[in-house]
Amino acid sequence: MGTPVSPGVIFFAAIFTNNILLSNFLGTCSFLAISREIRSSLGLGAAVTFVMAATAGLNHLVYYKLLVPFDLVHLRYIVIIVVIAAFVQLVEMLIERYSPALHVVLGVFLPLITVNCAIFGVALFLIIREYSFLQAVAYGFGGGLGWTLAIAALAGIRQKTKNAPVPKGLVGPGITLVTAGLMALSFMAFSGMVQMQ
Amino acid sequence: MGSMLTGLIVMSGFSAGLAALLVIADRFLADYGEVQVDINKGEKNLTVQGGGKLLGTLMEQGVFIPSACGGRGSCGLCKIKILEGAGPVLPTETPYLGPKELGDGLRMACQVRVRQNIRVEIPAALLSIREFRARLAGLKDLTPTIKEVDLALEEPREIRFKPGQFVQFQAPEYPGSPEPVYRAYSIASAASEPGRLTLTITRVPGGICTTYVHDHLKPGDTVRFNGPYGDFFLRDSDAEILMMATGSGLAPLISILRQMRDEKVRRKAVLFFGTRNREDLFYVEELRALEKELFDFTFVPVLSRPAEGDAWEGRTGLVTAPLIGHLSQGDNSKREAYLCGNPLMINSAVEIFRARGITDDRIFHDKFA
């Protein structure tokens, strides 16, 4: 099992060339909803990165140590969702107990993450691409950072263009989607750097 | 068949394991042990079970902080000063706390969780607030949507309040609500009868507490409330009193009028009472009697939309219209305003007063949101 790509390359690729948001278009709901201010988008990004990296490792373990041996691969969707949901719950409790300051930054975002499709997508990709454990964690961590980079960049652009004269029909979500599309186009420029599939 | 069974067992085991993990984590992580709550720098020291919201924790200990929304974080009334141990300001609090309030250390008691020893400052008036148990002595329809709730106090047997103040009435667990909730209602009865308490409660479609009162409460039932709260009460001066109410906003004002009758207050007063039509008016006979009993009192009912059979010869239209007429005569610098009811009515009345020289320090209101 495993492709002969080093985890470092996967990590790098997940941020730039195969950005989960701008090349796979996963996790767009919160991408559009929480990208009005750089500050809160960074908070959400940090929470997503943490959960994505951790659940990538967890789901890798659960898939290869539980589902494959018992021949229950067909249940992977539901199992992955349950793992993510339980993990988010647990992390929220831990953070609330031990780090009130972090809870203030991440607290409101954590429940949102349970339904973030980017995290689910990472878990599915690492199975489809047959990553090793290290590769999976590198992919999850990189994927999270890439998602953060994308949402923070969009938030920056939206802050800059908040008062820009936008055609009437495009005000709000319309122009945001156009912006996201242009960002995806520009991220394509990275794709020559590393090839990963 | 065999594979289905394994699948079932493994999946169930896995989910049960995760659920157990969460329950155990909740048990251990949410256990904050016993913590100390210090009130007013040593005036009172409470040992409480940590982990709960400050508002509820204090209420369990018999310290009642006013809250109109019952702790849902939507009214901003439960602000108190926390000297130490509140933790960082939460995003749910920021909409209700201005820069000055944050600088003074004010926080919303319904949002702050008691995790460690905490030191708070609570105004002395709030510490005198108590929880009361009462028996429902009478329940009467004043209008098709407003019920008069008459309570006979049992424990403690008397309540001391300033007419105009409100209490928080408890709707206990009932089929419409899984947990007790508290809602604020103004006291309509006179302070001279401290063993009785009258509330006028308007039915709110879908409201937890009002549905309980209108559909479930029966005479003889035991009810609980705490109070009194609020700074809406008659100020001591010789200024003319301008009162304005809509709907059940009449409650605190009739309490004030009954006090004026009992204490023989010699002040000029006028009440503008606005409702939709004739059947929404209540306490009319008593108000007409008060016109004779009080020193100089005028009652002006105003119907915004009289029904066809109302045969109404009194005023119609906006309740603020006769007010404007009244303000155009006499000296507005010697007038005080007491407003209660619909927030929109209050806002527009406040504008009218300001424009005619009645300053904010002589306008008192209680918005029924």
Image (tube, coloured by chain):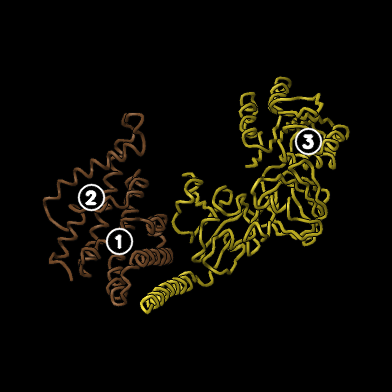
Chain colours: A brown, B yellow
Q: Which mark is residue B279?
A: 3
Q: For mark 2, what is the residue?
A: A23
Query: Contact, CB < 8 Å: mark 1 with mark 2?
Result: no
The quarter in which the N terminus of chain B is drawn is bottom left
For mark 2, does the 10 Å Cα neighbourhood hold few (<14), some (14 to 19), or many (20 or more) residues? some
Residue A196 percent across, percent down from the top left: 15, 58
Q: Nearer the viewer, mark 2 or mark 3?
A: 2
Q: Nearer the viewer, residue B117 or A188?
A: A188
Disc 2, SS: loop
Q: For mark 1, what is the residue?
A: A52
For mark 1, does the 10 Å Cα neighbourhood hold few (<14), some (14 to 19), or many (20 or more) residues? many
Residue B50 percent across, percent down from the top left: 53, 68
Q: Chain of mark 2?
A: A
Residue B180 percent across, percent down from the top left: 64, 59
Q: CA distance from mark 2 to mark 3?
A: 66 Å
Q: Is residue B188 above or below residue B314?
A: below
Q: Is residue B172 above or below residue B17?
A: above
Disc 3, SS: helix
